[in-house]
Image (cartoon, rainbow, N blue to C red):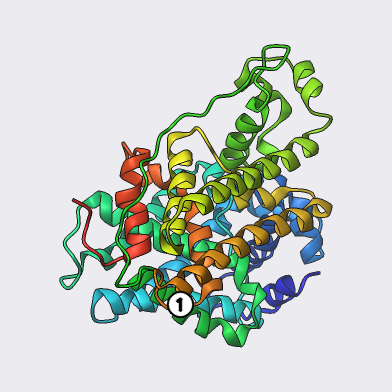
Amino acid sequence: MSSTSKLSVNKRPEEGASKFERRREEIVQAAVAALNEHGVRGMTFGHVAADLGVVPTTIGYYFRHKEDLAVACFLETIRKMNQIADRALQQDGARARLRAIIHEYFDFRRRIAEGEEDEAANFHDFRTTQDPTANQAYVDFFKKVRTIFSSSDAEPLGRADRNARTHIVLSQIYWAVHWLPQYNPEDYPGMADRVSNLLEYGFASEASVWNPPTIEGGTSWADDADGVPNDAFLRVATQLINEEGYLGASVQRISARLGVTKGSFYHHNETKDDLVVRCFERTWQIMRGIQGRVNAQAQNGFDNLVAFASHLVGGQVSGQQILLRTSALSAVPQDMRPKLLAGFDRSSSRISSVVSDGIADGSVRPIDALAAAQVIAGSINSASELAYWVPGLTPQSALDLYLKPLFLGLFSPAAG
């Protein structure tokens, strides 16, 4: 039994709760660990039952399907996130509320790390549930956070601008799950200071000018001998894994989306795991390739960072250069994860080096390079979901709505 589950089982139930409600709460708390470990599709009643020391049929008494249990996990975490937002919104002024929500969340992660709070569900596979109640609960939470940018002291913004900036804030919250554990829990408040400062004031020094590159959509795919594009399997698999998780992106579904047989799939790929590794490697190859090109062209560190992020975000918005999200790691076999996590770490390290170069040449204001790299990486990672909140988004409009406030600060004026 994991330490998280021990805390859940031994947690003192709320006053007045029935025996059924208390047991249901214990099951949900234990299921969060399994959900984070295996994803919605990989989690089973057996995982949760083993953690609680009961038989799987016990879980089935409280939840008919595992998807119902997953929804309960998400709803409980959304409830906690609403509490965080409610406390932050008590602050006076938009900037104070922004700082507060980051500090409240990082303190929440500190309490989890130190065993003072039960683990929260990661939102990796949230969309795979397609549950109307959970979806509405999340939309309501999103709207609550969005009120930060509706404060009387905030720059007047249209709905698309407010949605995009809210998405940046929440992207940093979810991305922190991946990198905060690299630090000691007592360091979390300091990291909250750094991240909230970056979101509030951006990256640019007073000498820098916002001059993003023009983003062109479209990438050519060379055909293989059997008429299937060499990169098509990787591109389609990446899309499906992002949408449905590792287990949801089956060989059959990948083949069907391409309009080929399963035999053709295995002509290109020995196993599905082999394909997933290649999808990750493709993502890193794209990132390295763009970094190489912008390094050769950018005049300074700030322009380098903007060009790098612009090409990666634009490619995802256009659908022509989709990157595999870290959410794919939630159900990847355990023995594959260390290598894949190391790849993301290398990408963040390269970004931090460019941030340091920008500080040295005066184009980036003095900031924490490691925290800055994570803020950029988190925004790139979540760019594929921006269109959910900003309908009609194009690669070029994403620069104005999403990247401009990221690099110049979330309270900078809207473009145009």
**Residue shown at 76%/17% (left/top)?**
264
Where residue 98 appears, as percent x and y from the top left, is: 34, 73
Left or right: 123, with 266 as reference point: left
Residue at the farthest top position? 226
Where residue 324 appears, as percent x and y from the top left, is: 61, 44
Left or right: 393, with 341 as reference point: left
**Residue shown at 62%/37% (left/top)?**
238
**Residue shown at 70%/31% (left/top)?**
250
Does the rendering let one see residue 405? yes
Q: Quadrant of residue 262?
A: top right
Establish if 268 lies above or below 413: above
Q: Quadrant of the N terminus?
A: bottom right
Q: Quadrant of residue 30?
A: bottom right
Between 16 and 32, the one lying in front of the other is 32
Between 65 and 183, the one lying in front of the other is 183
SS at badge 1: loop
Does the rendering let one see residue 140? no
Left or right: 76, with 202 as reference point: right
Between 88 and 152, the one lying in front of the other is 152
Where residue 184 appears, as percent x and y from the top left, is: 65, 83
Left or right: 154, with 194 as reference point: left
**Residue shown at 60%/22% (left/top)?**
257
Where residue 77 appears, as percent x and y from the top left, is: 52, 64
Establish if 333 lies above or below 154: above
> Which residue does the numbered mark 1 point to in the structure image?
367
